[in-house]
Amino acid sequence: MLTSFMSYLGSTLTPGSAGNQLWALIYVLIIFAGVSVTVMCMNWLERKALAHFQVRLGPMRVGPHGLLQPIADALKLMLKEDIIPAEADQFVFWVAPLIGLLAAFTVYTVIPFGPSQAVSDMNIGILFMLGVSSLGVLGIVVAGWASNSHYPLIGALRSSAQMVSYEVAMGLAVVSAILMTSMNVSGTGTLSMIGIVQAQQQQGIWFIFKFFPLGLIAFVIFAIAMVAEVNRAPFDLAEAESELTAGFHTEYSGLRWSLFMLAEYAAMIAVSAIAVTLWLGGWMRPFPNLLHAAAWDFIFSLFPGLTFGGLAAIAFIGTARMPTQSFFKIQRIGLAVFAALIGFIALFLLAIAVVAGLSADTSLVARFNQGIGYVYWFVLKVAVFMYLFIWYRATWPRYRFDQLMRVGWKVLLPISLGVLILTAIVGVIVS
Amino acid sequence: MSDRTNELSHLDLETPDKTYLDSNELIINMGPQHPATHGVLRVILKLDGEKVLGTECVIGYLHRGVEKIAENRTYTMFNPYVDRMDYCAAVSNGLGYCEAVEKLMNVEAPPRAQYIRVILTELNRIASHQLWLGTHALDIGAMTPLFYTFRDREEILKIFEKYCGARLTTHAFRIGGCQYETYAGFEKDVKNFLTFFAPKIDEYEALLTTNRIWLERTKNVGVISGPDCIALGVTGPVLRASGVKWDLRKAQPYANYKDFDFEIPIGTNGDTYDRYLVRMQEMRQSMRIIEQAVAGIPEGPIMGKVPKVIKPPVGEIYHSIEAPKGELGYFIVSDGSTQPYRLRVRPPSFVNLQALDVMVRGLLVADVVAVIGTIDIVLGEVDR
């Protein structure tokens, strides 16, 4: 075990490839814990951001600025009575949230956080990803059916129709990105997620800007379809609160319900990760080919530390602005400790970056960028998408079912087909 | 429910109360506990997939017997009860009741009281429309306008609170005038509100009026023609959006509305979007009325010559006003005693709700909540 541990540290192999099962396991654990924690953070962030869009404060009571609210919620959901309706199909009702959760988490096996920071480098990565992520609909359909109730049934039917139709446009958009990966000397494309990012690196362009505006259109189609795919506003018909009370999870409560939520947020992160990988250069920092001097490497290596520093500054300002009454003393201390923790991470990251940058060994900066920089840029890009999800929800009304179908089949599908054909033609002409 | 089809055969109403064995058809019970039925409305939907084949409204979950209570209370004692009907537009309810009794007694409120009444009623119209806009947008899936409208409605409620101590069920008026003189700074507060609110309407409109999804969800949804509206007795913004220029403030001026210069916005298509536009315009027109009223508010007494014990002569009266939701009428039969012999309320929500079935036939489930929102019902008023 130790030898394989040591051998990995010195290599750039992907954990899943031969001899690295141990690292693959560790990555699986890290990802599972990381995604669960991210979902909790997202829960807090969504409530806060949504509240601020809507001139409210959002959670403020549990912990400073409601920071402990997700934990309180999780505890509450776990302690709630486990209700299975008498008329429900017990086993299917029980298994439905697990299907959704499994599908959402399995996708992470092929998401590349960096060239060697992935559980596995599957040669059909993107196909695997699309296939598994569309299994999520099975959990929803089964949940709606097993509830044996009208509203969940309608919600489930809507959601299955919606996911199937948007999957088509989504798939075609993905194919046009895959076509772009074959724009190299040997003319061979790749379906591997890592390969797709490396193709963007080799061609020196993110696929969103490739064959402008074809890549952009394909990206926009994917960005729309992925919102529909994960049932988020304005396409949240499956759980349309004002129409179907809660849609497919009307009969669910407690832990089972929270598993649906976990699956939904995990799926949101997963589809955002696909979009980032296919069109936004995955783990690459901005302009890796133009600004590739050692000085630029150093400057970009400061970014992770600066980001944490910014977060810490926000937390410190929040601490300073908290009410001075003794009642808030514990909350102030709590927030200050939280800010100090983030600040410590920031200082640590900055210190490593600076030490690596000042040392004579230039490979240190590169190693820092490979170890932390890749994951940082990937997570940052995904975070932008997560913020967009919240923004959409705050701004737009909900589409109606038939309009959703019309947009899917009559607008997105023809456009994505056209983009695919044009990409192929342009690709042939260029090469 | 079968008898209502006789008069309106051209509407092709079909009763959904048969038993259907066809498995494609689904009977769904929407409400009384449902987030989009604005209280305790229960709608039984007959669906073919998502398509609505027919609806049946079940009401009465909030019935408090207001009309019967009136028979056991004196005219003065009954005054606060009317606030509890349409609790989103309590001031309008009070105005209608007070004016009806005044008309029965043949007294008139003094001019200053009339002006105060108009200012508060129009403020309440804006508040009611804000509440409608927020909940309607929420039904269609836009969460944010709700909070914007509630933020701005707060300013109106603050004025009410300063004027009479209550925010919703204001009981602002008395038979013969107003009980309270305006507080110091009332005019300034109202003027401040007008300058504060003008850009806020633009803000709502920026979010919705040209929003593509909003247009798709509201255009050609819940269409009802002018003649159908008249046949069903529908009044208020719903009627005006169908192109019928009927507003009691102009058609049968009450209070002192004839002193003010304002327009009656009307729509053309009678769809949900037109009703939205009409109500947005009405808010602007209400602001115009308030502006003129505040500028021209006269000095003088606020109570007319009304005896301490209100004893109208024997007779009957029907008086109606243009409440935010439509024609609000009071029919009072007096036997000469201190209590009404019979009091009947013609609530706009109750009558307008009849149009729901006509509007949603053939539409989808999602449109049902949009149409319930666009009719703008308050269940306190429907059930009384």
Image: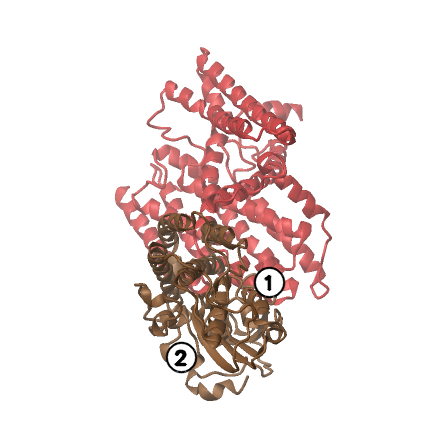
Say above or below: B348 vs A20.
below
Indicate left or right for B368 with B254 as reference. Answer: right
Q: Colour of chain A?
A: red
Q: What is the x, y in percent for residue B299?
A: 38, 56
Indicate left or right for B129 with A346 as reference. Answer: left
Q: What is the x, y in percent for residue A381?
A: 45, 37
**Mark 2 highlights which residue?**
B230
Q: Nearer the viewer, residue B209 or A430?
A: B209
Q: Does residue B258 appear in the picture of this structure?
A: yes
- In which image quadrant can residue A188 be found? top left
**Mark 1 highlights which residue?**
A152
Q: Chain of mark 1?
A: A
State which chain is coloured brown.
Answer: B
**Secondary structure under the numbered disc 1 in the rendered image:** helix
- Name the front one of labels 1 and 2: 2
Q: What is the x, y in percent for residue A51?
A: 51, 44
Q: Chain of mark 2?
A: B
User: What is the spatial separation of the Cα atoms under label 1 and label 2, in whole angstroms?
Assistant: 39 Å
Image quadrant holding the C terminus of chain B, namely: bottom right
